[in-house]
Image: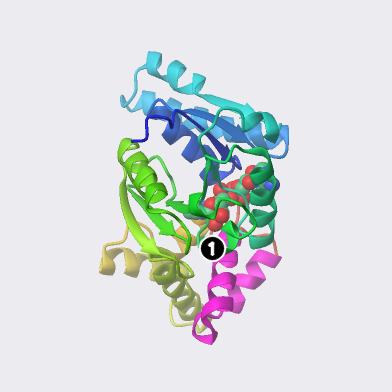
C-alpha cells in the first residue's frame, strides 16, 4: 500500500463509522473518529468496546491486543483538528447528498491537497460529491458492508474524474485491511445495492399484498436462496432509514421501476427504523 497511509479520519461514528474505525485500528492504522456530539462519539466507542470484548470472549483476540487497538482510535469533535496528519478521510454520515456535499466542501478547505476523500455512500454519485471540491481526482467511493469488520467485500467506486493512482492506493489499502475489493463504475446503487433495493422492495410488496407473513418470507428466502438473513431481518439490521434514503436516491435516478414501496416510507415516518430504535419489521 501507499506507505504514507498511516492515519485516517472517519467522519460519523454511527453503525458504519464505528465499525470502519475498528477495522482500520485492527490493521495498525491510526483513526481520528469524528461526530457532531459527544454522546454520539461515546456511543460509537461503546459499540467498538463491545465488539472487542466479544472478540476476546470468542478467543479471537488477546486482552493485550485490545489495548493496542483501542489506542489507535482517537475520538474527536473538532473536525479541523481531526484532519491534522491524515492522508485519507472516509465519510460515513447520513445518506443525504446535500449533507455529504456540505461536509466535503468544508473538508476541502481544511485538508492538504494530497488527502484522499472516500465516501461510504450506499448510492450517491461520487462525481457529484467530488464536484464541490478542488480534488476530484482524489475523491472515490469506498463502500463497506455491515458490519465492516466481518463483511469481506468493499466496492471501490470510481467517479468520472477519479485518478487511477487513487484507485490503486485504495485497492492496496483494501488488501491491507484483509478485504476483497470489487471495482465498479459509477451508477446509482453501484452493484450490490441496486440488486438489494429491488430485492427488498419486492419483499415489501409480497408482505403488503398479503401473500405471506414476514416471518415466512424471511424463512423462505433464507432456505430457498441460502441467504443468512431474510429481507425483513436484513432491513431491520441495516436501518430502515438507510434503506429508505438508498431507495429514494436510486428511484430518483433510475425511474418508476425502482419506486420506493409506501410501506417502507410509512415505517420510517413512524420512527420504526429497525434494531437501532428497538422496532422495525420486528421488535427488539
Ligand atoms: P448512522 O445513522 O448509524 O450514523 C451516521 C452518523 O453520522 C451519526 O452518528 C451522525 O451523528 C453522524 N453525522 C451526521 N452528520 C455528520 C457530520 N456533518 N459530521 C460528523 N458526523 C455526522 O448511519 P450508518 O448506518 O452508519 O450509515 C452511514 C453511511 O454509510 C450512509 O451513507 C449509509 O448509506 C452508508 N452505509 C450504511 C450501511 C448500513 O448497513 N447501515 C452499509 C453501507 C453503507
x, y percentage for residue 215? 43, 66
Q: Which residues are magenta?
A: 240-269
Query: From this viewpoint, which residue is outermost toward the top?
Result: 64
Q: Residue 262 magenta-drawn?
A: yes
x, y percentage for residue 280? 58, 60
Label 1 beta carbon less than 8 Å to ligand 1: no
The residue sitting at 34% across, 23% down in the picture is 61
Q: Which residue is mark 1?
A: 127
- The colour scheme of the drawn protein is rainbow
The residue sitting at 41% across, 73% down in the picture is 199
x, y percentage for residue 183? 34, 58
* Residue 62, placed above or below residue 265: above
Q: Residue 256 magenta-drawn?
A: yes
Is 199 or 2 nearer to us in this picture?
Answer: 2
Badge 1: how crowded within 10 Å, few (<14), some, or many (20+)?
some
Secondary structure mainly formed by the magenta segment: helix
Amino acid at each position: 500500500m501507499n506507505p504514507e497511509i498511516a492515519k485516517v479520519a472517519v467522519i460519523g461514528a454511527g453503525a458504519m463509522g464505528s465499525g470502519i474505525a475498528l477495522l482500520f485500528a485492527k490493521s495498525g492504522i491510526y483513526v481520528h473518529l469524528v461526530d457532531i456530539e459527544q454522546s454520539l462519539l461515546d456511543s460509537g466507542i461503546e459499540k467498538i468496546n463491545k465488539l472487542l470484548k466479544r472478540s476476546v470472549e470468542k478467543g479471537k483476540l488477546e486482552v493485550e491486543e485490545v489495548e493496542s487497538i483501542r489506542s489507535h482510535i482517537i475520538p474527536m469533535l473538532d473536525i479541523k483538528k481531526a484532519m491534522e496528519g491524515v492522508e485519507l478521510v472516509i465519510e460515513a454520515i447520513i445518506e443525504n447528498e446535500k449533507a455529504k456535499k456540505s461536509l466535503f466542501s468544508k473538508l476541502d478547505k481544511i485538508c492538504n491537497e494530497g488527502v484522499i476523500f472516500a465516501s461510504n455512500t450506499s448510492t450517491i454519485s461520487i462525481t457529484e460529491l467530488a464536484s464541490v471540491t478542488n480534488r476530484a481526482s482524489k475523491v472515490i467511493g469506498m463502500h463497506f458492508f455491515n458490519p465492516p469488520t466481518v463483511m469481506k467485500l468493499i466496492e471501490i467506486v470510481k467517479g468520472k474524474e477519479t485518478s487511477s493512482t487513487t484507485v490503486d492506493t485504495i485497492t492496496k489499502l483494501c488488501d491491507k485491511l484483509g478485504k476483497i475489493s470489487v471495482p465498479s463504475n459509477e451508477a446509482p446503487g453501484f452493484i450490490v445495492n441496486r440488486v438489494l433495493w429491488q430485492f427488498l422492495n419486492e419483499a415489501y410488496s409480497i408482505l403488503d399484498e398479503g401473500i405471506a407473513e414476514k416471518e415466512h418470507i424471511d424463512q423462505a428466502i433464507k432456505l430457498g436462496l441460502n441467504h443468512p438473513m431474510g429481507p425483513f431481518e436484513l432491513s431491520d439490521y441495516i436501518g430502515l432509514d438507510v434503506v429508505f434514503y438508498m431507495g429514494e436516491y436510486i428511484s430518483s435516478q433510475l425511474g418508476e421501476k425502482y419506486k420506493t414501496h409506501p410501506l417502507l416510507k410509512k415505517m420510517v415516518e413512524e420512527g420504526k427504523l429497525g434494531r437501532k430504535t428497538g422496532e422495525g419489521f420486528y421488535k427488539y
